[in-house]
Amino acid sequence: MKIIHFADLHIGSKFERMPDDIKTELNTKLRNAFAKIIDYAKENNITTILMAGDIFDKNSVLMKDKKFFYDLIKVNSEIDFYYIKGNHDSSSKYNDEIDNLHTFDGIKSYIKDNVRIIGYELADNNSSLYNVSPFTTDKYNIMMLHGDIKNQKDNNYIDLKKLQNKNVNYFALGHIHKREDGKVGDSKYAYPGCVLGRGFDEVGEKGFLVLDTETNSTTFYNFSDILFEHIDIQVNGLNEAELKKEISTLLGSTKHSYITEIRLTGKSDIEIDINDLEMSFKDKRYYLTIKNASKQALSFNPNENENSLRNMFINKVLKNPNLDDDTKEKVIFYGLSKLMKEEE
């Protein structure tokens, strides 16, 4: 049997730091991503979809988003949907009974052909999860969980080692937005990652997994038509023409499917005009933003023909035998910054 496994759709995301028109477009893409997953299932005769939590970005869901999601499940009655809640949508509710939507309360399992699908929604005390009896091996056993299997400080931590002797063939996981897979004991586990990136901390290909229970293997399908990208550029010693050439080189070819953030770092000898840079390259990307995290390079050499407080300060620091060169630079930098503010 082939089964689709996805998680962390986060319908209704805020998409902070984006213009309003881009926010609207990206939220539409999030909603439509679910429809695309269903289309893929129908085109490939897949009748089982696992949804491993955080379908919605928050418990209070816009009615249009909730209705869109559940109506898609209703009209695709030939597909069985298995849905565990995550930490973002743990309290979101829908009152209608839908025959082909299977949800979980405590530890619950469903049988479909030769597959057993077990789900557990994490609670304050997860002892019932770890104390569950081993499942029989007459079926291919899948356990759906939404949590972090590595970070013990995470409120949604899952200790897979306590579950490795429960005869689970595949742990269908959600919560971590980066794709990852591995084994614990004889059991396989996989995070499909989020379906679509929602910020510059979620770069790269996004999509879903297809699990083949006959071969006990997964295949990743990238179907994101929008990808997030982050680029760091050191501005040290670059003039305006050189900076633009560096940006052009790193952006490379035009990619209208990319949302790109460029972060300028280091020390600049020129005054950087962010608006000019963004306008110069905005046609290269779906959306481009440039953040200036560089510092303005200051001249630390005193002017011999100038009798000023600035010269006195620089000379005193440079002649201090108790300071190394790096410390002198820091003291002069912050001192001159303070002087410039007082002169404004």
Image (cartoon, grey):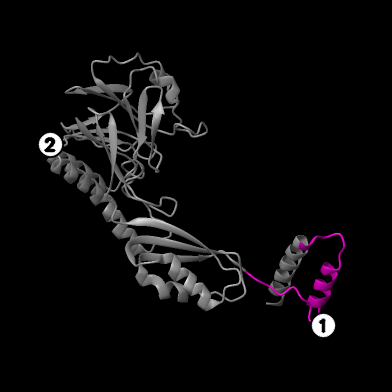
Q: Is residue 255 shown to the viewer in this render?
A: yes
Q: Residue at x 40, y 15 (%)?
A: 131
Q: Residue at x 54, y 74 (%)?
A: 272
Most common SS among magenta residues: loop
Checking the image for residue 304, the label placed there is: 1
Q: Which residues are magenta?
A: 296-325
| Marks 2 and 1, the one that precedes in the sequence | 2
How far separated are the C-alphas under marks 2 and 1?
84 Å
- Please name the residue that numbered disc 2 is placed on: 77
Checking the image for residue 324, the label placed there is: none
Residue 20 lies within the magenta run: no
Q: Residue at x 42, y 75 (%)?
A: 280
Q: Is residue 182 above or below residue 128?
A: below
Q: Is residue 306 left or right of residue 280?
A: right
Residue type at numbered disc 2: Ser
Residue type at numbered disc 1: Glu
Q: Which one is in front, 291 or 220?
A: 220
Q: Residue at x 16, y 23 (%)?
A: 113
